[in-house]
Amino acid sequence: MKNIAIYARKVTKQNIPVFNQLFSIFEKLGWNAILEDSLKTQLVTKVGINPSILSFKNYKDFSTGIDLAISMGGDGTFIQTVKFIRNSGVPIIGINTGRLGFLANVSTEKMEETLEAVKRKEFVFQSRSLMKLDMENNPFGDDNVALNEVTLHKKDAASMITVDASLAGKYLNSYWADGLIVATPTGSTAYNLSCGGPIVTPGCQIHMLTPIAPHNLNVRPMVVPDHLPITLTVQGRERRYLVSLDGISQSIKQGEVVTVSKADFMLNVIKFEDNNFLDTIRNKMMWGIDKRN
């Protein structure tokens, strides 16, 4: 590995020392930093890095010449980094500059030893599936993929909506609720978890349909094979609703058909033996910790 892409949302007083440490590690390892365009502008202004350093603007820049992507921030930043990677096959690692994340789960304290392990190739690739959204007017353009979830939900009205769902062309159910989440295994610990959906280990070839505040309490989250396309339509008292991909929303008309299917490419996430999903979920959820002590 030689050319490393770096993405972060903001450069603040709190994380400037982390960036300085990162550039020092890069110099030690002989790596070339390639910065996201707006991040480069912030670092030139606030840190005084060399303005001649290389940068990238969109996913097309990942088609060649980039060996690794580093996300600096939390899980939201990690997801934004994935939108640059898309189907390029470039592996990603998440360094968390805040609290422990499910995706960005490398602490800044372990940043140097982690990147040294990457240099020695002491890691494994964990493949994560993504979802693709298809609509007639394609409001998301090239950004029509999601790592966590696709969500249909109401826009402004307080009244519930009805989301009709079909699986591989066969009618499944009409969800009378505030909305419906279709989640990947990666997204099982995101919005899906908040709405009572199951936790799923990465690598499972499934999707989850989880209603948001359903009117009927006997309507439960459902796990389905990820190779079966899911067709959704929404209806209610309003004319327009929202469809979201990993939290980015677009307006949708009543009755408009939304098709969710597994993307034809996977994301390569760098993982280490001493920092796996089971450790992360146990620590994040504080399982086994007795608060009485």
Image: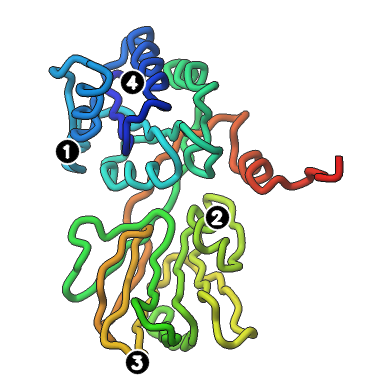
Q: Earlier in the sequence, mark 4 or mark 1?
A: 4
Residue 110 is left or right of residue 47, and the answer is right
**Who is closer to the viewer here, 59 or 160?**
160
**Which residue is situated farthest in the left direction here?**
52
Q: Which residue is mark 1?
A: 57
Q: Quadrant of the N terminus?
A: top left
In three-dimensional space, the C-alpha distance between marks 4 and 1, rounded to whole angstroms, equals 21 Å
**Which residue is situated farthest in the bottom direction here?**
237
**How many numbered marks does the figure carry?**
4
The x, y position of residue 54, in whole percent, is: 17, 23
Dot 2, how many residues are within 10 Å of its Cα: few (below 14), some (14-19), or many (20+)?
many
Image vertical order of residue 231 relative to residue 71, above or below? below
Q: Which mark is residue 42?
A: none
Q: Earlier in the sequence, mark 3 or mark 2?
A: 2
Residue 255, visible in the rendered structure: no
Secondary structure type for disc 4? loop
Dot 4, how many residues are within 10 Å of its Cα: few (below 14), some (14-19), or many (20+)?
some
Q: Which residue is mark 3?
A: 237
Tags 3 and 2 touching, CB below 8 Å: no
Q: What residue type is disc 2 on?
A: Thr
Q: Which residue is mark 2?
A: 189
Tags 4 and 1 touching, CB below 8 Å: no
Secondary structure type for disc 3? loop
Q: What residue type is disc 4 on?
A: Met
Q: Earlier in the sequence, mark 4 or mark 3?
A: 4
The x, y position of residue 212, in whole percent, is: 51, 74
Q: Nearer the viewer, mark 3 or mark 2?
A: 3
In three-dimensional space, the C-alpha distance between marks 4 and 3, rounded to whole angstroms, equals 55 Å
